[in-house]
Image (cartoon, rainbow, N blue to C red):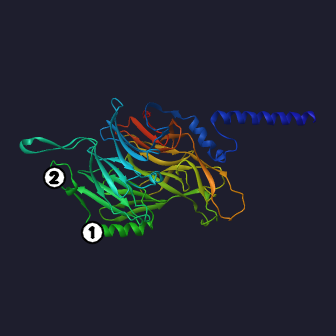
Amino acid sequence: MPRGKSIIVWRRARIWGYLAFWACVMGISLADPTLARLGQEGAKAAHAVKLKEVHQFVQKDGDKPERFLSVKFSPDGKRLYATSLAPQARKVYLRAWNLDDRKLAWQQTIATEDKENPMLDSRLKLFQVDVSPGGSYVLVNDWGRVQLWAGRNLVSKGLHDKEVVIHREGELAFELKVEVPAINERHIGWVSAARFLQSDGIQLLAAFGSPPRLRHWWQISSLSLPPRPGFMNELDAKKESQTAAEFSGLLKGSRVTCLAPHPTDSHLVGLAGGNLIWIWNWKTAKVERRWEIYDHTKPLTEKGSFIAYEGVGQVVRVYDLEGTFSSGELRWVSAHGDNGAPFAPSGRIPTWNVNVGGNLPWQSEGFVEIWNREGKKLHRCVHQGAVVSVACAKTAPWLVSAEFRKQVKLVAIDQTPGPPERPVILEYLDLPSCIYVWDLDGKLLALGEGHQAGITDVAIAPSDDLIASCGIGGTVRLWEAPKPR
């Protein structure tokens, strides 16, 4: 080989050697199909300020980690609640930790496979936790019911002003039955979302069914007694039928996946279902605003059941929605992921659909979007995986988002003679995932690293000094929130 050509070859080999070295350092494959798209975002994340982790709560189920589903601070910031699925025991737990000494306060089994549905781990937004404004009750949405657990000792005054404990802390206070339409003859339906309204008294909303319906409970007793089933009342039949009709017409059969109370007015509730975001006045049963979510960087193509429309991007799913009121302006923050299967149970899954997200191997993708009051998009915050949860600070203009990274690859195809339509095997690989802190202008402020698998939920303490994150890797992590600049 001539000397000039050999020098060129040597220089090219040296360049590729450097690239391969730094790719190994950063844990990135040069063949990764997402490298080009995420290179810029990955570089930003690599140089972001790292959040300080202050504690971990670790739970295992035999030799497997529990899959944490949801996390929430109490209104006084002294307790942390979380739900998790034990994959081997086939149980779902609700736990409460004291944040002063970081010790477990109580633990309860809230569902089992024997009693409930055999598809416990198939619904990402099942068994989400919320806490009433006063901290008296901890709410969990479930198959065909809403559970309310005592967040503290619930007492009332009896004869001679003697205090009587009605429900002790950590006990099931009562459950609200919901007649959810069955999926089929084997599987009952589930309450897809439930939240407390941030207003006086005990009020909560629950969404369920397909077409979707909404149910509202509130405490009508002004006595000091804690609410019992007799003190909880639903909307009357006429109002509820109007609500059902409004929901059915609005969402066209989509299931509600998120309930988000308005940050300044409890009369307005933001809801997300499918790829719709809509703001709904639950008192008047009127839709005040709605908009659809598309990823315009990925135009639809005519593939399978998808049809290409000029100027319309790929459909993405709304996984979470939260409002924040900062500097006199209302902002909505939404979490999105590709409409594929990044949240299917880990392992090898037989399927007939090999076009999951395009060419395999395929990695989950997503982003956070920030909207103004009118539903105009202001900023997009791109992640290296799907985003399934967001939380907004109460007293400062920043938010935190949870990333769920998962890769899907084809591991086996049966080539033996036989029917042409047979399932292939897809393998779902968990990837390290991060939490991101952004300002309301879409600037990345900080990054929390440590979760070795997808992150399912994030929460911010009422004083905005702590961040909690949980995931399917068996840990709930506490982070020191970024300091104001």
Q: Earlier in the sequence, mark 1 or mark 2?
A: 2
Q: How many marks on residues?
A: 2
Estimate the x, y position of residue 322 in percent, counting from the top left.
Answer: 41, 50
Mark 1: secondary structure: helix
Decide: is 281 above or below 401: below
Residue pointed to by mark 2: 222
Q: Nearer the viewer, mark 1 or mark 2?
A: 1
Q: Which quadrant does the N terminus fall into?
A: top right
| Residue in front for this viewpoint, 174 or 414 | 414
278 left or right, relative to 385: left
Point out which mark residue 237 bears.
1
Residue 394 seen: no
Relative to 379, 27 lies left or right = right
Tell me the CA gap for discs 1 and 2.
24 Å
Image x and y of residue 2, in percent: 93, 35
Tell me if label 1 and label 2 are in contact, CB under 8 Å.
no
Residue pictured at 48% horizontal, 49% vertical: 388
What amino acid type is highlighted by mark number 2?
A: Ser
Observer-nearest of 75 and 470: 470
Give the percent coordinates (x, y) of residue 14: 78, 33
Report whether residue 457 is seen: yes
Q: Residue furthest right?
A: 2
Q: Quadrant of the C terminus?
A: top left
Sort mark 2 into few (<14), some (14-19) or many (20+) by Cα contacts within 10 Å: few
Q: Residue at point 31% right, 51% down?
A: 147
Dot 1 crowding, Cα within 10 Å, few <14, some 14–19, many 20+: few
